[in-house]
Image: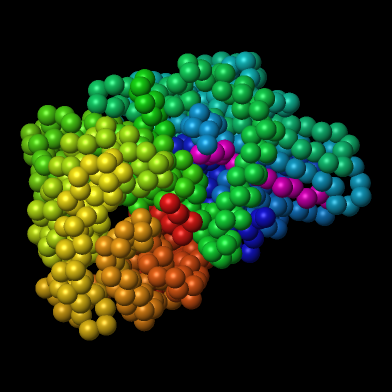
Amino acid sequence: MKLTDTKFPAVPLITCDPYFNVWSMTENLNDDFPRHWTGMQNPLTGIITIDGKEKLFMGKKRHNPFYNKFFGTPDKIQQTNLSITPLKTIYTFADEKVELEIIFSTPLLPDDLKLLSRPVSYMSYSVKSIDGNKHDISVYIDVSGMLCTNTPDEKVFFGKSDNYVFLSSGTENMLKVSGDDQRINWGKVCISSPKGKMGFTDDHSKCDETEKYREAPVMENFPAIFAIDEYNAVETADGFFCIGYDDVLSLEYFGQRVRGYWTKDRENFDKIMTLAIDDYDSIMARVDEFDSKMLADATKISEDYAKVVSIAYRQAVAAHKLAWDGKTGLFVSKECYSNGCAATVDVTYPSIPLFIIYNPDLVEYMLNPIFKFAATDKWEYEFAPHDAGQYPIVNGQVYGDQGIYGGHLRLESQMPVEECGNMLLCVAALCKKKGTTDYAEKHFDTLNQWAEYLAKYGYNPDNQLCTDDFAGHLAHNCNLSVKAIMGMAAWGMLLKMMGKEDKFTAIAKEYAKQWKADAFDKDHYKLAFDKEDTWSIKYNLVWDKLFNLDIFDKDIFETEVNYYKTKVNEYGLPLDCRSLYTKSDWQMWSTILNDDKEYTDMIVSAMLKMLSDTVDKAPFTDWYYTHDARQVGFQNRTVQGGLFINMLSF
């Protein structure tokens, strides 16, 4: 099954991690350069030559002056179709002689973490004659040096290994800078072809494929590595290229520099590039199997829902880095265009439905940095931390009152009730799905402390940050109160699973009864306990239904959804009454509060319409206006994993 006839603001091409992350942000692949998720150019050029005539199928020719100088800029071959599946982006092109299919795929298979973490992506091609004749065909791809630089004024050098060519920015800058609008400027980007020619090119010449280690300024010389497959007098031609990135060291983790998870059995980069080629057929078969299963499950919700989760999957996974610290896995998120924080709890929380469904071990790896940070002397609070660093440096928060890491961590930068509830609910979901409380027992004292904090401070929260503070801080937040209540209930559930005494379920039920009375406002429930004629999405209620805990009266769910239906705009349901913007994750969560297919279809269709109509060309934003589809902020964030909540069950 391929999902066609759908327009997206950006589509994924290479999606390995937050640094090696390339998208097409135009309707046609040959309208512009591919770009990093941040919007910076990451030029890739693709050219098919048919009987000696070059035609451009990807990018622009400008970044490769050698070919411009000697061959001119080729005409474009017409793009005739674009299809998206969870693991594939499929383009079709045609002229009067041939049809060309180009497939980008990064095999992010959640049941094979070494493969999921392997920093190699594929561009496959298939050419067939459509005029009944045989043709001389070549397929060319090049990769710009900008893929291994943060800014174009940096230098790279060429190199060659046994089975690939590369451009490298060295290791001098490795793990020196953290931040949001940042691209990698160390390590090497590589291209490999199992049957074609490979080499280098820049402004001055087409370099001999055996030449090594010549330095070139990116902005002045436009260096690129290339591969080309050639066929004589054929009716069909099929092949693939591997595009990989060796980042050498991936994260700094509380003073320890760690590598990708794929290195846990001591394999080196040359070995995995070889494996990527040798295992191509079996990997693609597994990719197709995964796609088919996910699409079949998603289509049970609706075809539109299948389209939404298809564009979300690779983004949600690849905005993390899967690493290995020598003892356990780390699945570290980057808050893309929201300060670049690492392992942020209120980014993990909305993300987990995807990972609970397909591999709950990844949720454990997402939470590990928070528990490690909370156990350090630096963390002095009785509630849960907001994050554990700023990507790719996971050494603790950057909210010091004496510089980035200096002094005390500022209380006003924390989210006390928010993150306690999030951590308890994430651990509960992980343990319930795995059928064991091992992870909760490992962190028992910490989790129990956070549950006690919620019992004391969670019902009627003080004025404090929460994940939805876009319109300003808010005291007496009704939805945050629900999170606190459900966090306690989740901990009570885990205590019962452990065979331990549970006082928290009773507290949660008592609070839920009080909440119903305090939050009610005519025909719905308030934004804040002290604010009449207000409303908000009570998405935190979902866990009562998913865990089957019966903490809140069921009529609350029906009342809320019926009210939401009166507030839906052309592009979705606003987050609350204070603004017309919404969050994609939270409005999707609202669709499972009540078994109301009409409402679910309303939200899903509005979200898909936003993706089609928005003029903001960027990876799937989770924060946008519901009246005009404009992006407010945020893009390429992992929180789109929350869109999978309709497929989650325990």
The tally of labels here is 0
- Horizontal placement of 461 versus 536: left or right? left
Magenta highlight on residue 107? yes
The answer to which of 583 and 79 lies nearer the viewer is 583
**Which residue: 61% across, 23% down?**
275
**Which residue: 14% across, 60% down?**
459
**Which residue: 12% across, 29% down?**
377
Q: Is residue 433 visible?
A: yes
Q: Is residue 580 above or below residue 169?
A: below
Magenta highlight on residue 1? no
Q: Is residue 199 above or below residue 408?
A: above
The answer to which of 255 and 125 lies nearer the viewer is 255
The answer to which of 349 and 222 lies nearer the viewer is 349
Q: Is residue 157 above or below residue 600?
A: above
The region drawn magenta spans 97-110
Q: Is residue 547 above or below residue 194?
A: below
Q: Position of residue 586 (x, y in %)?
A: 35, 62
Q: Position of residue 349 (x, y in %)?
A: 32, 49
Quarter of the N terminus within the rendering = bottom right
Figure quadrant of residue 435:
top left
- Horizontal placement of 262 versus 351: left or right? right
Q: Position of residue 600 (x, y in %)?
A: 46, 70
